[in-house]
Amino acid sequence: MKIGMAQINSLTGNISFNEKKILEYIFKAQKQKARLLIFPEMTLNGYSPLDLLNKKFFLQQISRSIKRIHKQVPKDMTVLLGAAGPDSSPKISVFFLQKNKKIKVFSKEILADYDVFDEDRYFKRGKMQDNCFTLKNMTIQVLMCEETWHKPLLRYKKNPDLIISLNASPFSLYKDQKRKQIARRWAKKYQSPLIYLNSVGGQEELIFDGGSFILNQKGNLIHQNPFFQENLSYFDFPEKKKKNTFITTSRKKRDSIQEQTAKALIFGLQEFIKKNGFKKVHLGLSGGVDSALVATLACEAQGKKNVQLFFLPGPFTSRLSEKCAFKMADKLGCRLITQDIESFYLKFLKIKISKAGEKLLDITKQNIQARLRSLFLMAYANNHPESLLLGTSNKSELALGYGTLYGDITGGLLPIGDLFKTEVYQLGRYLKIPANILKREASAELKKDQKDEDDLPPYKALDPVLQKLIEEEKDPGNPFEKRIFKWLINSEFKRRQSPPILKIKNRSFDRGWRIPLSMRSYFPDS
């Protein structure tokens, strides 16, 4: 039996757009004589429509669309379509569509309720034992995303001939290996080949990487779809399970972590820009590594003609920064506009400051510069609504609030907001950012001879602690870790107002990060 795997890029909330694309895939699969065509979890409405699921009109749109698609399913094809439904108290469901036959519905029993997932809020639970069907003498078990990650338990006396896992699984580093490890447990336990189908595309901070695959009954990889692109592939299964039927595919060398990171961020940027109605991007190029990396990723994502760079020197901007900024722009082939902010800064200094404010005058002067730069960049955004302002803050800075609110923590997106500073350097080296940028000491250059290490611990000492506290979610141990943890908690006010980031880690400053905003840190002595 020929099975088609539609690794599809849905537009969340846009039912008519998704319906049209789904039908295009169905008709393509018909031409290839596929007998079963499968789509990922929640394909019709995208993952996840969030509070749209509380709107009756939205659920009605989904229902009407399923009926229209059902009518156009070819005579000799079965379609498994992921969508919310089938009623006003929706479940995460898969709709079994055959020509002139009643629609069957399989619904997800194990819901995801952690990190960015909030399925218990919106959906009712189904029953996994009902999610099985027979087609062309094959017994096929359907799993939906989170169900695959739990103990392999099908509640049947007889093993299925095929297991199909339909997913909307976001990308994070090392996750592909974990998916295959989990899927292998199912295949080996039930001696059944397994299709793992994943969606592809970007949705706000989430990046769905595709990478769908098939394992044989021994858990060996026999088919691999590409990552970060739509794909319609096919695989022929015998109608009765036979041992040693499937040949292991030749293994392609796995991408390095830097290559995975670069591909994910470039793809995530493309998706965020396109799906939010932008065509171009712009950003401030300071001569430092963060803005150089963001500019590089932006050019890879949109092309150099669609990237506008600004150099906005102030009273403390060094000649080295100017040289590095111009060299970076020249390397990328991007136009660089220079706008000196010093005269505007000096005018702001003439504003009378209260006696209480004089104590904080140094930090006030620094913030004025960052906010002036933001003023110019946002003015450009106003005059060029097709262009998205990209921020350049990294995860280390966001963790400790090392940035100016409404200043450099400004923009529509922070592409490197999930990379620690040391990781920024690593990716910068991989993408061949000029050595004079990579070697110079990090500095905001908001006062004379300023260095990041004047205010922060060295990044090589700081970042491993931040990784422990944030990504590994461990408690602070020694006094240094406790100090950093307190700093992390007290920076939530700034973080809550920062732009969205592109999520590439298992624990990020995104919708899954939920630290109380109004609290005072408390550290017991014991």
Image (cartoon, helix red, strand yellow):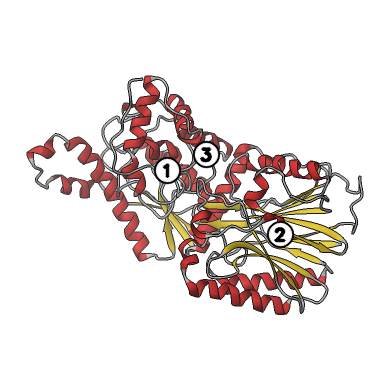
Q: On the rendered structure, is 1 left or right of 316?
A: right
Distance from disc 2 to disc 1, alpha carbons, whole Å, reads 61 Å
- Residue 308 percent coordinates (x, y): 44, 55
- Residue 386 percent coordinates (x, y): 44, 65
Q: Please, what is the three-letter code of the amino acid marked with disc 2?
A: Asp
Q: Residue tagged by mark 1? A: 325
Q: Please, what is the three-letter code of the amino acid marked with disc 1?
A: Ala
Question: Which element carries disc 1, helix, strand or loop?
Answer: helix
- Of the two numbered discs 3 and 2 on the same chain, state the one appearing first in sequence: 2
Task: Please report the residue visible at 36 percent of the width from the left and 44 percent of the height from the top.
Answer: 495
Q: On the rendered structure, is 509 left or right of 119?
A: left
Q: Residue tagged by mark 3? A: 433
Q: How would you rate the neighbour count of disc 2 (Cα within 10 Å): few for under 14, some for 14-19, many for 20 or more?
A: some
Specify the quadrant of the image occupied by residue 400: top left
- Of the two numbered discs 1 and 3 on the same chain, state the one appearing first in sequence: 1
Q: Please, what is the three-letter code of the amino acid marked with disc 3?
A: Ile
Disc 1 to disc 3: CB gap under 8 Å: no
Single out the mark in the foreground, 1 or 3.
3
